[in-house]
Amino acid sequence: MDGIRLIDLPKFLDARGNLSFIEGERHVPFHIARTYWIYDVPGGEVRGGHAYRKNREFIVALSGSFDVTLDDGKQRRVYSLNRSYTGLYVPEGIWRQMDNFSTNSLALVLASTGFDRSDYIYDYDEFVKTVSR
Ligand code: TYD
């Protein structure tokens, strides 16, 4: 599970409310090429279920909570995200699934590459073969 880690973001706590921020190559270890977010996930739904060959990501539960299950082909670990100032860095070549979304949860994902369907590995057996090469 090399390289996977939780990263605490800066936070400015204020009587007016809190503020956090992310700068590419400073708070996350890559240039941010793309940002997307996952929201309005119906109860019980599962997102992901794939790996990326090259893309690296940073995932933050901006609101609510959800679980991210990561698998490097040898070990599997579940990260429960529920803070808007802590994110999960996921390097390339990691199988991932997101589930257990709470009502009104909002997942922010920063990505190191633009969207490229050919970067996805959707077949778990193919993924295991790729990482064991
Ligand atoms: P997908 O990656 O399958 O979502 P998840 O892994 O969370 O289950 O993406 C869902 C759809 O959105 C799919 O048709 C591809 C499209 N999409 C883009 O066009 N650009 C993007 O940056 C992302 C992440 C997805």
Image (tube, rainbow, N blue to C red):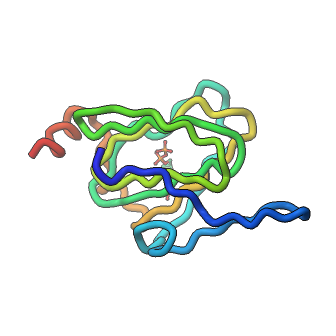
- Residue 125 position by quadrant: top left
Name, please, the residue furthest toward the left. Answer: 133
Position of residue 20 measured from the top left corner of the image (x, y, whole percent): 69, 65
Left/right of residue 119 with respect to residue 115 in the rendered view = left
Relative to 1, residue 19 above or below: below
Q: Residue at x 13, y 42 (%)?
A: 132
Residue 109 drawn above or below residue 22? above
Q: Residue at x 9, y 46 (%)?
A: 133
Residue lying farthest to the right in this orientation: 16
Left or right: 42, with 79 as reference point: right
Q: Position of residue 93 (x, y in %)?
A: 28, 50
Image point (32%, 45%), residue name: 94
Q: How many marks?
A: 0
How far across and down, in percent of the image, does residue 59 sit?
53, 52
> Residue 44: horizontal and vertical position, in percent?
60, 24
Q: Seen in the image, is 101 located left or right of residue 56? A: right
Identify the image quadrant of the N terminus: top left
Residue at 34% x, 32% y: name it. Answer: 76
- Residue 64, by quadrant, is top right
In-image side of 68 versus 103 (left or right): left
